[in-house]
Every structure is written in C-alpha cells, then in structure tokens.
Image: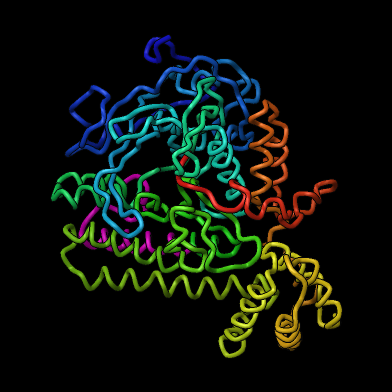
Amino acid sequence: MSTQANRYTLDNLKFDNRFVRELPADAETDNYRRQVYQACYSRVIPTQVAEPTLVAYSPDMAAQLDLSADVCQSIAFSQIFVGNSLAEGMDPYACCYGGHQFGHWAGQLGDGRVINLGEAVTRQGEYLTLQLKGAGLTPYSRSADGLAVLRSSIREFLCSEAMYYLGVPTTRALSVILTGKQVRRDMFYDGNPQWEQGAVVCRVAPSFTRFGSFQIFTSRDDLGTLKKLVDYTIAHDFPHLGSPTPAIYLQWFTEVCEKTADMIIHWQRVGFVHGVMNTDNMSILGLTIDYGPYGWLENYDPDWTPNTTDAQGRRYRYGNQPQIAYWNLVQLANAIYPLIKRAEPLQQAVSHYFSRFEKGWQTMQAVKLGLETFNPDSDESLLTDLFKLLQIAEVDMTLFYRGLANLNVNSTLSEFYLFIEQVSYKALDHESTILAEAWFNDYLQRLRKNTINDQDRITQMQSVNPCYVLRNYLAQEAIDQAEQGDFALVEELLDVLRQPYTEQPGKSRFTAKRPDWAKQRAGCSMLSCSS
C-alpha cells in the first residue's frame, strides 16, 4: 500500500517540519542517484517491504515522544517505522552533504540510506527529527542499495541507547524492525557477499546536521545556500545566540568547538572508539552520530581501532580521537570562513577546543581515579605511568576503573597484584609487576592527600566509571540470537544498559571480561564499514 495513501495517527505525535519548510529543496522530484545542487535536501518516499516485524523499541525514547507501549507494539507502529506508511504530518526527505573521509575530500555524500520522516514536537516543545536508516534508495545512495541489515541495526540501536544512559552526548534510537527482505552484503570486503536479514532502525536527534552539511556548499562556491543553512542552524539549534551576524557566526563556531570537546572527553572516559570520524559523521550539536564500525576498549590499547578499513593507518584509533576532532573542526572552520572572512578568530576558536578538552580531560581523569582535583605537578606522571601499565599488562579498561574504587589507602601491594590479575587478559610478568608496584605506591601517596572520606570517593568514582558497557561480544551474542528469531537478549541488554553505573543482581555475566573465543571473531573485535 502506498505510503502517501496510508497515514496513521500515533497518540500525541505531532510534526512541525521546519527543515523542509525553511531550507531550499531539490527541484528534481524523481528518486534516482545524482549530484544535487543548491539544495539542502531531496524529498523521497521509503521503500515498501513485505513483512515488518518489531525486534525491539526503547521505552524511554518512546515515552519522550509520547508513544505508549500499546502503540509501540501495534501494527501501525511497525508499518510506519519500517517505512511502509506515514503518520499524519510526516514529510520524508534525504539530506545533501559532503565530507572528508579518512582525510580526503569525498565530494557529495548525503543520506544514502537514511530517510528523515520529519520533526516531531514533544509536549515539552522539543523538536526531534525522526529518521529511518535502511529504508531504501535516495538520490545520495551512489552505488549502494540504501538498505541495512539486522546485525548493524541492532548494534546501532543498542549503542545509541547505551551511550545515552552512560551520559555521553548522542543521537538516540526508537526502534529496530525487520523488513522481511534479504539484503546482500560483503561483510569482509573479500569478494564473498552473503544474504542477510534486512532491518530498519529509527534514529532520533534534535538535529542530524553534520560538519559536511556546510562543507558541500563551500566546496561548490554556493555561498547563498551555505548562509541559509548556517542561519537556520543558529536560529533553531542555537537560538540563545541571537540573530546571525559575522560576530554571531564566530560565537556559534566556538560553541560547536566546545560541544565537540565535551563529547570527545566522554568518549575517552568510557573507552568508546567511533571508528569512522569522517567530517560527515560529526554532529554540529556535539552528538555521537552514525554508529558503524564502533567498538569499546577491552584490553587498554590507545592504538586500537574497530574499523577494518582503518586497520593499516589507524587514523581513527582511540588515542587519536581528540586530534581528529580538532582536524575536523579546522575543516568546518574552512567551510564557514566565507561568511566571516577573518582567519584569526576562527583559529582562536579551534585553539579553544584544545584548551577546553585538556581541562575537561584532566578533571575527568581525577574523578575516575577518586582524586579531589587534578594536580599537574604530580598527576601528569601518575597518568602516564598508569596508561603504560594498563597497556603492557593488557588490563580491561572498564573493569580496572570500576574495581579501583574498592581499594583504599590501607590496601596492600598484594591486593593490588591480585586485582590486576583479575582484570587483565594475561598474567603479570616481570615488567608489569615492577610497573604495578611503582604506580600503586604513587597512587596511594596521592590518595592520602584527599580530604574527602572514603565513601564519598567511592561514590564519585562509581558515578563516572561504568559497571556495564556494550561490549562487542555481548552485542554479537544478541545479534546471533536475533538472527534466529530470538530477541530476548536484545531486550535484556537494553534493560541492563539503562543503569550502567548500578550493579544489578543476577547480571554479573554482563561485566565479564571478553572471552577468548571473541578475541578475533568478526563482530567482536573489528568490523568493516559494510552493513
């Protein structure tokens, strides 16, 4: 049945589609792959599928959209959020943007497999864009099919919500729905594509505007559309800044730098590695966006990347994320330079990114270690030595920081050795033992300078060091079961990850170290950009 003919009302879901109303549209209305000029979006209709089946939905995200449990479990919900039907007020479109991919300008990219349904307005007056990933072809699909598979959709759904509950700035996810269609994917890029189950994930954010959304217009010398998009972004996403002027553009860019720094601090805090920090995957709101080949540090390794495409250069490795964010901000500065025409204040704003990151990173590390404040004179070396120990001893990052709170100034070296053995992926050797002794003695000396009591220290540490993260092997286990029609582990993981800082009875298996079988298995170690 046509999406245009079959419209539903979903409780209190109301739409006010400012983006398509206020910004220039693609004049071509036929949906075929092409270069799109002087337009921020193209109107498209999602591809129809035969058998939509709900895999899971986020109760919290649904509640924010005023959607009841009954509605989310209804046929109408699955029909709409798989792309078969439209709710009243939806006006679907795909966005035009460009980007630097792995450091090289890639030209037009755009929403190749994403279709925005519209901007829902909540009871609180918040605007939230709903978009379907995997809902079919758009003018920006290039040589791809615009579809997605179940494994990548589950990973995006779970990680979006997990990051939100961890307190990391992020886009969110409402639902995952099977399409009933088979999708052909070459997961390993080795010339052996396989048929997989198709799925659609509904993503939610105040805005999905990216750095690349501005870059595309500057690259084409389309400064008129560039200005329209910047002015729109300031008016609706940064309204506190006031009416756009060159001075306001600078304030806006400075705030983007700050939001980006804060996001990266949170990534580093929880051990998250994005894997594809291209400029088209950088949110103008400082939100984690586009969960593709992401991963979580297990054994601490600053050189680790989850992306097989990045395996050789390791551009997007964990330890390089702060520098890549800076590089991407420089590209955004270049894109908006024509509106400001002054290089020095833009350079100052980008420099501000590093000063904000450095200060926030130091504060974050102090809290993770249970220190009242960060003292550069002593704590720089304390951190350097700790990171060396964690890497050489192959210590599980999440388990180490969480368990460290249980030690105190009265703990013995033997207790620390035992702790390291429990949270590491190999036995302590001679070098690790020496490093552990030196660091632990320095740490105890530093702890003794605290004036807060032990319980306050523990509370502080447990508030930023999660007990549960979406370990890669756990996500893969949920995917394996879901591919067999069992969605229970997806639901259980979502439920556990909603309280990542609270130890939950009967859920200890979700805190376990990565098992040996998962070290090299696809989906548990590294992933490709293929979905």
Give coordinates of residue 131: x percent, y percent.
44, 33
Q: Residue at x 27, y 24 (%)?
A: 31
Q: Is residue 423 above or below residue 67?
A: below
Relative vertical location of residue 285 with respect to residue 270 in this rendering, above or below: above
Place of residue 374 in the rendered image (x, y in percent of width and height, measured from the top left): 60, 80
| Residue 252 on the magenta span | yes
258, above or below 440, in the image: above
Q: How many marks?
A: 0
Outermost residue on the front side: it is 191
Residue 467, picture quadrant? bottom right
Confirm whether residue 125 shows in the render.
Answer: no
Q: Identify which residue, 43 or 120, lies in the foreground.
A: 43
* The residue stretch that appears in magenta: 235-262
Q: Position of residue 497 (x, y in %)?
A: 68, 46
Residue nearest the observer in this picture, 48 or 350: 48
Residue at screen point 46% across, 43% down: 190
Q: Main secondary structure of the magenta part?
A: helix
Residue sitting at 34 percent across and 53 percent down?
101
Residue placed at 84% from the left, 73% from the top? 418
Give the left or right position of residue 514, taking residue 218 as reference. right
Residue 490 colored magenta? no
Q: Quadrant of the N terminus?
A: top left
Question: For this rendering, which residue is in front, 201 or 372?
Answer: 201
Quarter-of-image position of residue 160: top right
User: Residue 241 in the image: x percent, y percent?
Assistant: 33, 56
Apparent side of residue 178 relative to residue 135 in the rendered image (left or right):
right
